[in-house]
Structure formats: structure tokens, C-alpha cells
Amino acid sequence: MQTIALIAHDKKKDEMLEFVGHHKDLLKNFHLVATRTTGTLINEKYGLNVETMMSGPLGGDQQIGALIAVEKVDFVIFLRDPLTSQPHEPDINALLRLCDVHNIPLATNRKSGHILLEYVAKKMNG
């Protein structure tokens, strides 16, 4: 089973919930991992059995990065807030870099996330 990582900055949590709701039928076919708050919110609202890591600022970004480094994540959807300074910015940059190093498709906004999941759905259906 392929794995999708879902991450959302605080100001993007509601947007991530809407995004997941839109793609719920597709996402239920994947192993989902997320940072703590994002994953908990998705589990509470949609019951998708998301595996949660630590909160992003407490190391969750690094935990997902480690999964990427050992090729246990196939796609990343990271709804970033580009207008708010993040105290764990180096961790975020490291995660993005790991996606590039390991050639992992990465969506950093809702529109690119939709495009990524549209591609995934087409690939699943032949």
C-alpha cells in the first residue's frame, strides 16, 4: 500500500480538512501519515486511520522526513503558510529538500494537491 504524508501549518488546518473531505474516497485507499494535530483532526472528522507523528515544531516534520529518506512515503501534501514565520523553518526546508533528493512528488498548496491526487487516481485506474 502506498503512503501519503499530510501536513498543514496552523492557518491551513481548515483548508486541509476541506481538501481531505473532497478526496476522502481516494485517500481511504492509502496509508496516511501526518503530523500530530493535522492527523488528529483528520481522524476525528473523517475516521481515515491516519498514523500520527509528533507535532511539526516538536519533530513531526523530521519524522516524516526520515520516512521519506528510507522510501516509505510516496507522496507529500504539505499545505504551507507562506505568510507566517515558522519557528521550525529549518525542519520544513529539510523536509522539502528530502522530497527533491528522493524524487518524491510534493504539493505545497491546495491546487497542486488536487493535481497530484488527480494524477494518483488516474495511475490507480490504469
Image (tube, rainbow, N blue to C red):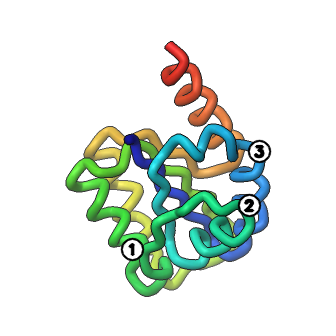
**In what quadrant of the picture does the N terminus appear?**
top left
| Nearest the eye: 6 or 98 | 6
- Disc 3 is placed on an element classified as helix
**Which residue is label 1 attached to?**
90
- Disc 2 is placed on an element classified as helix
Residue 47 point in image, percent of width and height: 65, 62
Disc tally is: 3
- As displayed, is residue 5 above or below residue 107? below
Disc 1 from disc 2: Cα separation: 25 Å
Res. 81 visible in picture: no
Q: At x 56% / y 26%, what residue is drawn?
A: 119
Res. 84 visible in picture: yes
Amino acid marked by disc 3: His
* Circle 3 Cα neighbour tier, 10 Å, few/some/many (<14 / 14–19 / ≥20): few
Disc 2 from disc 3: Cα separation: 9 Å
* Circle 1 Cα neighbour tier, 10 Å, few/some/many (<14 / 14–19 / ≥20): few
Left/right placement of residue 5 relative to residue 103 reads right
Residue 25 point in image, percent of width and height: 68, 40
**Which residue is label 3 attached to?**
22
Left/right placement of residue 81 relative to residue 55 reads right
Residue 62 point in image, percent of width and height: 34, 72
Q: At x 66% / y 65%, what residue is drawn?
A: 42
Amino acid marked by disc 1: Pro
Q: Earlier in the sequence, mark 1 or mark 2?
A: 2
**Which residue is label 2 attached to?**
17
